[in-house]
Image (tube, coloured by chain):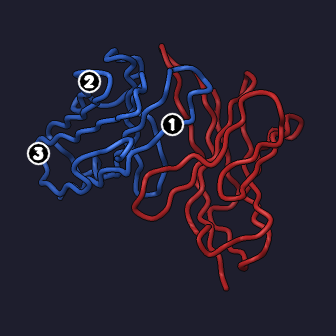
Amino acid sequence: AQSVTQLGSHVSVSEGALVLLRCNYSSSVPPYLFWYVQYPNQGLQLLLKYTTGATLVKGINGFEAEFKKSETSFHLTKPSAHMSDAAEYFCAVSSSTGGGNKLTFGTGTQLKVEL
Amino acid sequence: DTAVSQTPKYLVTQMGNDKSIKCEQNLGHDTMYWYKQDSKKFLKIMFSYNNKELIINETVPNRFSPKSPDKAHLNLHINSLELGDSAVYFCASSQDRGLSAGGYTFGSGTRLTVV
């Protein structure tokens, strides 16, 4: 069964610093991987996704992630953090079940951005 | 115009009551989902429908009954509410049911509190 592990339930960075949120996956087939962001009291918004092709994926709000098969990782990065990036971030892997697909989410990483 | 809208946004009710949550999407998507987010922010799929057909039912108690009158609507009815049902329930939709369809569009959630 597919699963994801997010290292670090809380990450704190200074404004302008590099953001690195870690995600490792476990999958018996080539994975489809996703990063979502959740702002307080809101739904989840897709940041970026990897399906096939280029392993460096660019998303919204300046985020990007690199799929590394050898490390079974899909870490999320942003060169320079903004205060508005403070939110909960979820890594997810897609898998087939029954007649459809489902997302299996990691436990989330709360990003705090300090002045 | 909200892409995936859920009502109500907040729901406070007593144990033993029956309640419904409604979801509508105006994206023309074929597949809709219900996810549950618990108090630790862990997200887990409950159900998925494709063109009004139930395709995923993830070992959810049969007190939970989804209904899809058409492909734009997916409602969730919960009987005999229990304290453990307190959570945020998210509706989502996707263009199709394939693995790459994990780029869901989520609603803003319904926070259910059972007292």
B46 and A86: which one is in front?
A86
Q: Are marks 3 and 2 on the same chain?
A: yes
Residue B104 image label: 1
Residue at 56 percent of width and 65 percent of height: A87
Whole-angstrom CA distance, mark 1 to mark 3, is 32 Å
Q: Amino acid at mark 3?
A: Gly
From the viewer's perspective, is A47 left or right of A15?
left
Give the residue at mark 2. Answer: B68
Q: Of helix, strand and loop, which one carries label 1?
A: loop
Q: Are marks 2 and 1 on the same chain?
A: yes
Mark 3, mark 2: which one is toward the viewer? Answer: 2
Residue at 11 percent of width and 45 percent of height: B16
Instruction: Estimate the x, y position of residue A63 in percent, counting from the top left.
Output: 72, 55
| Chain with blue colouring | B
Instruction: Estimate the x, y position of residue A7 in percent, counting from the top left.
Output: 71, 56
Marks 3 and 2: CB-CB under 8 Å? Answer: no
Instruction: Estimate the x, y position of residue B50 in percent, counting from the top left.
Output: 39, 18
Say if B71 sits above or below A3 in the image. Answer: above
Instruction: Estimate the x, y position of residue B59 in percent, counting from the top left.
Output: 38, 27
Residue at 24 percent of width and 57 percent of height: B10
